[in-house]
């Protein structure tokens, strides 16, 4: 997880560690980048393993959450969010899966 990290100085790097049975686990390395606004079809659970990040919710009056090493967050499918700050480096573990059909 912490070895052979790619260079993320120019752009964020994402690597799928597992993609099976409707579950995708990814390692993402950020190097100070921000993101576009995401509105995903999947649920997402994220944990910051190394570094810091801030996620902002544009449809929730700009509410934001700061994450540090060891912090995690669940993002329901369709919840618009944007990574507005990352440290250099910032290493994420992300789990994507289909939302519950209730």
Image (cartoon, rainbow, N blue to C red):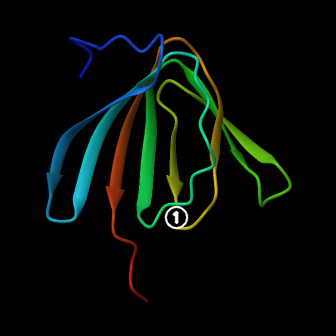
Res 43 quadrant in image: bottom left
Left or right: where 97 falls relative to 46: left
Residue at 50% in and 54% down = 74
Q: Is residue 3 above or below residue 70?
A: above
Left or right: where 40 falls relative to 81: left
Q: Position of residue 30 (x, y in %)?
A: 47, 22
Q: Position of residue 35 (x, y in %)?
A: 59, 36
How many marks the image carries: the answer is: 1
Q: Nearer the viewer, residue 52 or 14?
A: 14
Residue at 86% in and 55% down = 61
Q: Estimate how packed mark 1 is, as few (under 14), some (14 to 19) or many (20 or more) residues with alpha carbons within 10 Å.
A: some
Q: Which residue is mark 1?
A: 76
Q: Residue furthest front?
A: 10
Residue at 60% in and 28% down = 53
User: Which quadrant holds the N terminus?
Assistant: top left
Q: Residue furthest right?
A: 61
Res 22 quadrant in image: bottom left
Q: Secondary structure at mark 1?
A: loop
Q: Position of residue 89 (x, y in %)?
A: 48, 13
Q: Position of residue 72 (x, y in %)?
A: 49, 41
User: Which quadrant holds the C terminus?
Assistant: bottom left
Q: Is residue 20 above or below residue 65?
A: below
Q: Residue furthest left?
A: 20
Left or right: where 55 falls relative to 16: right
Q: Nearer the viewer, residue 51 or 59?
A: 59
């Amino acid at each position: 997880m912490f070895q052979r990290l790619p260079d993320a100085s120019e752009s964020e790097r994402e690597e799928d560690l597992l993609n099976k049975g409707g579950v995708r686990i990814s390692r993402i390395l950020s190097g100070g980048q921000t993101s576009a606004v995401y509105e995903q079809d999947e649920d997402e659970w994220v944990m910051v393993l190394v570094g810091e990040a801030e996620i902002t919710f544009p449809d929730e009056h700009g509410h934001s959450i700061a994450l540090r090493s060891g912090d995690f967050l669940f993002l329901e499918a369709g919840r618009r969010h944007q990574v507005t700050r990352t440290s250099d480096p910032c290493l994420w573990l992300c789990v994507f899966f289909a939302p519950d059909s209730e």
